[in-house]
Amino acid sequence: MASEVNTKFLQDKRLDRIASDILRPVGVDRSFLIWMSSLTMLLFVCLYAYYIQLDKGLIVTGLRDYVSWGMYISNFVFFVATSLVGMLISSVLGMMGYKWVKPIGRIAEIIAVAFSAVAGLVIVSDMGRPERLPYVFMFGRIQSPILWDVTVVTTYMTLSILLYVFTMIPDMAISRGRIGHTPAWLQKTYEFLSFNFQHKPEQYKILLKAVRILLILIVPTAFAIHTVTSWLFAVTTRPGWDSTIFGPYFLTGAFVAGSAAVIILMFVVRNNYKLSRYITVEHFDKMGKLLFLVSIVYFYFNLNEYLVPAYKMKTFEARHLVELFVGEHAFMFWCVQLLGLIIPMILLLFKSMRKPVPMFIIAIVVLIASWFKRLLIVVPTMEEPFLPKQYVPDAWMLYHPTIVESAITMGTITLAVMIISVLMKLFPVIPIWEIAEEESAHPDQQPVE
């Protein structure tokens, strides 16, 4: 983000065209109501599953004494990981001066807000006694990584919301009186969120300073949130988790998942909202290169994570690796590695595969593989305890998620999609003022649609 804003774009005729394009899909229409109604019905079904869990206890899930985390904690790690893309796009690339991230910066921030908010609810779904959650804050011990995790997740969510709202203030002021097709309550919301912004140079100066502070603060917070999450595993001595590289291993994996999520939303916005003028083929090409870069780094940490223990083949690590490579979880493991990492890396080398449609398909596969990757981090290790399994039912030997457990997990994903849908439909999904300023400063540049 620039250190100052040239407000000449407010007198440029391009502003009217840009605002008209970006605000055209904003509002509540029939298709949006149908979409949200479908998601709401699905969410109610999932909430009923959670009611069953509250009533009967965690016995209705596949969680037992050995595998006590399972799908819920895997889902939590996935949400935390994907939310980090807000920091990667807006903070790191934005502060480095890459202009091409401006149209997609808000998309990354929306993902960060939605996924970090739902991540906290995922933790509640794993608790047999959720009413005891306040005890974490009331009686939490500073030595506990769980307290660290709750603290950084809450901090990151707060910073993400502030960054999303602050960068949207000029757009709210620009949008006042420009969209007559929206309900009165939404127009009042725009009026409130504009905070009486008048596009004065001193207002932009204060705003940019506040945003810059948030961009700086969110970088160490984002690194902390997933590093601390990795420490929940790494501070134990369990094989598969007892690793000193779990912090950077988790971070690079987070960038892969987050980049894939941004690409998916870019495609949806470009096609459903008819905004190909602003989210161009070039943006998909750039995001494809970014996804390739973070995938290479993630591939390196995957090699370290498996090659080093495979070379030493200590007793418990050997059992864990055999289970992953040729055992019960081998099919999922190799699908995740090949479809979610290696094959996409190869495909992204070709420019033809960095077009919108191929990128959309690749991103969907990568994001799904990222979710199953978290499941592979959690479950196989817990299925191989140090002590042998004796005098327990056969059903406890391997972890099998139940319908109730799967429905609750689907409910959290549905809620994240609902939050993203609302933010994308009710507010400008592309920053109007930044695009207008950029086009005013470079009037001869024509986007490649």
Image (spheres, rainbow, N blue to C red):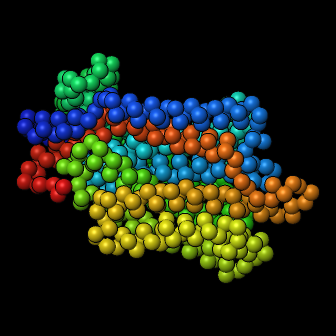
Residue drawn at (82%, 64%) of the image = 386
**Horizontal and vertical percent position of residue 65:** 81, 50
Regarding residue 105, the answer to whether it shows in the image is no
Residue drawn at (56%, 39%) of the image = 411
In the image: residue 332, left or right of residue 347? right
**Horizontal and vertical percent position of residue 398:** 76, 59
In the image: residue 252, left or right of residue 72? left
Q: Is residue 274 above or below residue 51?
A: below
Residue drawn at (58%, 70%) of the image = 334
Compare residues 399 and 31 and report the one nearer the observer: 31
Which residue in the rendered view is the most extreme toward the bottom?
Answer: 311
Compare residues 374 and 236 and report the one nearer the observer: 374
Regarding residue 233, the answer to whether it shows in the image is yes
**Horizontal and vertical percent position of residue 355:** 28, 62
In the image: residue 11, left or right of residue 195? left
Q: In which quarter of the image is residue 202?
A: top left
**Horizontal and vertical percent position of residue 128:** 74, 37
Compare residues 405 and 261 and report the one nearer the observer: 405
Q: In which quarter of the image is the C terminus?
A: bottom left
Q: In which quarter of the image is residue 192?
A: top left
Q: Is residue 10 above or below residue 441?
A: above
Residue drawn at (55%, 59%) of the image = 250
Please state the total of marks drawn on the protein image.
0
